[in-house]
Amino acid sequence: MTVTMSRKRFAATLAHRLAVLAFIVVALFPLFWLLKVSVTPTKLLYSEGVRMWPSETTWAHYAFVIENSDFPLFFRNSLIVSLSTALIVTLVAAGAGYAMSRFAFRGKMWLVGLLLVTQMFPLVMLIAPIFKILSSIGLTNSLSGLVLVYTAFNVPFAVFLMQSFFDSIPKDLEEAAMIDGATRFMAFRQIIVPLTLPGMAATLGFVFTAAWSELLFALMLISKTDASTFPVGLLGFVSKFGVDFGQMMAAGVLALIPAVLFFLLIQRFLVKGLTAGAVKG
Amino acid sequence: MTASASLEQAQPDRRPLKRLGLRVEPYLYSAPAVIIVATVMLVPLVIGMTYAFRDIRLLNPFSGGFVGLDNFRRLAADGDFYLALKNTVFWTAASVFFQFTLGLILALLLNRPFAGRGIAQALVFLPWAVPSFLSGLDWAWLFNPVVGPIPHWLTALGVMSQPENILSDPDLAMWGPIVANVWWGIPFFAITMLAALQSIPADIYEAASIDGAGPFERFRAITLPFLAPTIAIAVLLRTVWIANFADLIVVMTNGGPADRTQIVASYIFTTAFRRLDFGYASAIAMVLLVLLMIYSLLIVILRQTLLARA
């Protein structure tokens, strides 16, 4: 009786581990392939097409991409745009999120309404009008133009996220400080903000990843090489030099690095306490 | 007496100011967010709606005049639009179905404690961090018989007679972006479901197993009812989001071959970006918005009737 029980248990455990392993393999395989082709010498690319690992490896594709292409420039542009967007959004969203968490005010319903409306319509609707408006004030082909647009797109979601972080901090903390004579803003800055730093880091990570990945508005608003972000540059590269797979995948791996770093930063916030935030992609 | 009178006079002066300050405070905290969202999203939205009734083509300097409903008349007779509508339904339904099913399975697997769970979780959620344009390119390469293994595997399995790129086969091309989308979107559902699973109190399960309920019985009677609200919200929001998600299609197929992978969102983007026909693009966008609103309304009504019956 106990033997069959433990055997049954063992089989269930084995099935569970195998299933987890299958998910891991599927999740990692496309990234592994990207890495594999990026280190395969061009002469082996076709003869060793479906081998799991080439008989020879090389860093030549990376060297070429870093030294002879515009990718370092695209990388820098993307970094500037994504970091600025993430910083501005986090600051702006901390303010509005705090107001929504701590105050009962007449405009609150309107604020929530405004933020929700922006989540309901397809962003692709805005491509034409935003292009016309920005080009009339000279903000197309400019990194500031992109930062402006990305900031607006990410604020609504970040406000709800920050609100949920502020909600988890007891009100008594700043009330005590205010009884001791601090203004609310001082209490906010000196007591609440330090306590929400992990939450702010999570928001920063989310917004950075979103800005780093954005493609359609960047394609529309940027047509010059010196203002191109990584996705625009990579797609231009693909259509221009569509045959050099090694170099393209090397560039792809480089584009992946910052996203993965920020993912590791926010990974531990994902499941715990992020039920509210996880609703957006 | 005079002193106290002046004090009393001074106080009502200061109090309203302070009260005003307290009233204004939340608005000051939220002002930057409101200003930027209103100017960069709401204003262009309204302006974009007027474009739908105008003839705005960037390549034509004489365009810009109001044309009434001309754009919508053109749209009503546009076969490409109806094809895109059909493709959108297929793209959305298939993507959501597989993302949800596999995401739920993954969440159930991860909800059980085991050695190395933290690392396993970080690895299976990794695709979520991959930028959408890169997952599109990556999968396009995997489907490419020149550098990718998938066509060769399918041939070896006998599914394909010879290694071909499914992205250039009109009948199969849509599965390319769908597979990429499922791979990329499983973590979203898994994260949402896992968060919901972890909020189910453990003692309910203990009580149920003491009462003799087996694992499937526990799943049906405890897990599913607890998860139902989260599932409903996540699937609804995700459906709208995926219907509007054009990145993967723009990157992998650009709507081709023969418009067989064009969805409405990518059609709007192509009309604005390649043909620079802003008036027509805005008209399509208006129709998409109305369709999405009808969808949400239907869901709300459905929910109300179901709740009323229960």
Image (tube, rainbow, N blue to C red):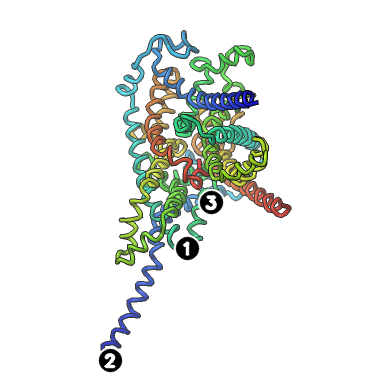
Q: Which residue is mark 2?
A: B1
Q: Chain of mark 1?
A: A
Residue A122 percent location from the top left of the image: 54, 44
Residue A117 percent location from the top left of the image: 53, 52
* Local SS, label 3: helix
State the CA–CA distance, disc 2 to disc 3: 67 Å
* Local SS, label 1: loop
Q: Amino acid at mark 2?
A: Met
- Looking at the image, residue B161 sits to the left or right of residue B134; the answer is right
Residue B50 tag number: 3
Labels 1, 3: front one: 1
Q: Which residue is mark 1?
A: A107
Q: Chain of mark 3?
A: B
In this picture, is B77 found above or below B174? below
Residue for point 53% across, 39% down: B194
In this picture, is B119 found above or below B26? above
Instruction: Bin the neighbour count of mark 3 within 10 Å (Cα to Cα): few under 14, some 14-19, many 20 and up.
Output: some
